[in-house]
Image: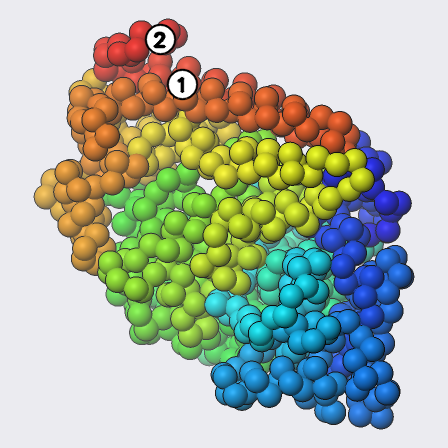
Amino acid sequence: MSDAAAPTRFGEGPLSRAAARTAGDGPVDVHSAWLPPEAFRAVGSRRALVCGAGTLVGTVRHELARACARYGGTVAWRSGPADAAPEDRTGAVDLVLALSTAAPLPAPAAEVAEECRRRHGAGALGAEGFALARTGDVTVVLAEEPAGLLHGLFHVVRLGESAFGAGRRPERHRPAVRLRMLDHWDNVDVHPVMGQVERGYAGGSIFWRDGSPRGDLTRVRDYGRLLAACGVNAVSVNNVNVHATEARLLTDRLGDVAAIADVLRPYGIRVHLSVTFAAPVVLGGLPTADPLDAGVRAWWAATTRQVYDRVPDFGGYVVKADSEGQPGPFTYGRSHADGANLLADALAPFWGVVHWRAFVYDHRQDWRDRSTDRARAAFDHFAPLDGRFRPNVVLQVKHGPMDFQAREPVSPVVAAMPATRLAVEVQVTQEYTGQQRHVCYLAPWWSELLGFAPWGDHRTVAALAAGEGGGLVGVSNVGDDPFWTGHPLAQANLYAFGRLAWDPRLDPAAVLDEWIGLTFPPGPAGGHDLVRRTLHEMMDDSWRTYERYTAPLGVGFMVRPGHHYGPDVDGYEYTPWGTYHFADRDGVGVDRTRASGTGFTGQYPQPWRDVYESLDRCPDDLLLFFHHVPYGHVLHDGSTVIQHIYDTHFAGAEEAAALRARWDRLDGLLDPGLHTRVRERLDEQVRCAEEWRDQVNAYFFRKSGVPDARGRRIP
């Protein structure tokens, strides 16, 4: 990104020129998201010293040099003992970023290193961690590995001037989760139904265009920079639904993947690739893809060796198999463990991993059969296989048992496989939460699910994902839109994913505050407090606002088939997809109890198996996910189900209108292009929320015959 003139409005910079343009292959101005030049003012106005060598240390030096050139600071680099200079020891620096191996360390860094060893022991910072301290007049970032130094720099950028204030005892910062990955559902070819990016709501792919790689990868480099600054360390660059052209990325188009890896490497981002399980047949010309066939195993071993010859730090494979038409081991009478282990064995010599997705279910269901339950499928398929996967298999489990709905319980698979490495998958792109046309800050939802304790004790979902080799994976919401995510405020979801993956204990409101402070740094126009306050008022509760005017009480879906945007209460009710609400004249909801339903509640450990089984104890916000109840059923707050539906849908539409009114207060304070884009999206959100309100309320009024107790008009 080019450095623009100093802003006159919050968030201003190159986007005013970019807002009306579509990104192309050549250099293009795009919004700087949470890394505008102003975010580097504090570090750029200091005297900095970087101690260490390697590609990532070079990135640290480059970031500081660019900031110092803008704000008048200086940066020195000492890559080894021969480079030692007197100022290293006299304290003539304000900021030291040093690898612990860069002996001799400058005095302030040596003090921090000694205290860290005394308090935490040798090796306590790990591959990506760092220590931060303020000793005397010097701020010190100390790391044991180059990746930690890069993360430490961006943490100082987050802190701004506060990093150079009062004294600070050494603080240890380490990622809680080892694998912090984004899956791109980007197609190389434009798919006739899903387009260039499947479930993408921010334009085309930043990697691919019309069957070819983008010629200029400058934007990919800037993307890697944004990801490193929020804590992401891996990216899968193509769709999990692997079509014919995408399959060839593994072999004759591997150079395209290597080019992306080269651009992302300086920011510590490892590239992964989605592959088709049928690759030995469609690419290798073999008659079978049977995972136990010796020829198949040899083909994968040889092909994987070629991948690492081109991309030495390649992360591994992502696989969707035997799901929604994708090929898999079932064709050959083999298990998912057989299929995953085949690829794991090919990757093991290179320390690669295979992310095997657990999103497997019957999508040819008979809607009249109430005994078949899509929610059960992942557990039924995978729980019996616990302990049978290779150590470098990561089972990638959607956070809920269905499909990224605005409210559903945590998947029981997360608690069912203690002998298997798990990655929990969330959807950053807002397929079922407004498609980046609606303000819907997802971090409170993710925080809630990461804090869920399947056994009712200290063992949370976050702790399980943070287990040996576990991970957190998000489906990316980025496209080639000048604002990255289409809706400028949807950038907060991408930022929050990285931050919560690094530390799931973070407060979502505090993460949002970080994003606001970086994205809209104070400018000369004044009014920064109003910007911050307004964005919190709009975004803190926006997920629940969205939930209020869409599908009620955890029942899910009720969206238009295919594109999944807007209301269609019966849209999926008589289809083979297994996404039903079973509303009739007497009641609504899915009976998933052991006593009279599908038995899904039995997949949970205690105490939740009995909590969800009980009509009295089941949380109201999941009531219709687990129970079919009469419209007159009384919720814990004293309201009936039907009145709750009316009240929440009226309230949700009113709250959407209030979002727009709050945003209007910022007219004139923000970049005009950004303000206009958000205002356009808010207009659509208000329209769509009213549509949801009217269709859902009218549907249930006509089903139940029960009028609104408050006398409001229902169409």
Question: What residue is shown with label 2?
Answer: 712
Residue 79: x percent and y percent?
A: 80, 84
CB under 8 Å between discs 2 and 1: yes
Q: Is residue 240 left or right of residue 224?
A: left
Q: Is residue 277 left or right of residue 574?
A: right
Instruction: Give the spatial CA distance, label 2 vs label 1.
Output: 9 Å
Counting residues from the start of the chain, the first of labels 2 and 1 encountered is: 1
Q: Name the amino acid type tagged 1.
A: Phe
Crowding at mark 2 (Cα within 10 Å: few <14, some 14-19, many 20+): few
Q: Is residue 307 visible?
A: no
**Residue 692 sits above or below residue 43 on the image:** above
Residue shown at 80% from the left, 75% from the top:
93
Q: Is residue 50 left or right of residue 579?
A: right
Residue 400: x percent and y percent?
A: 37, 49
Q: Name the amino acid type tagged 2.
A: Arg
Q: Quadrant of residue 220?
A: bottom right
Question: What residue is shown with label 1?
Answer: 650
Give the secondary structure at mark 1.
helix
Pick the residue in front: 42 or 705: 42
Residue shown at 71% from the left, 30% from the top:
675
Give the secondary structure at mark 2.
loop
Residue shown at 74% from the left, 85% from the top:
106
Q: Which quadrant holds the C terminus?
A: top left
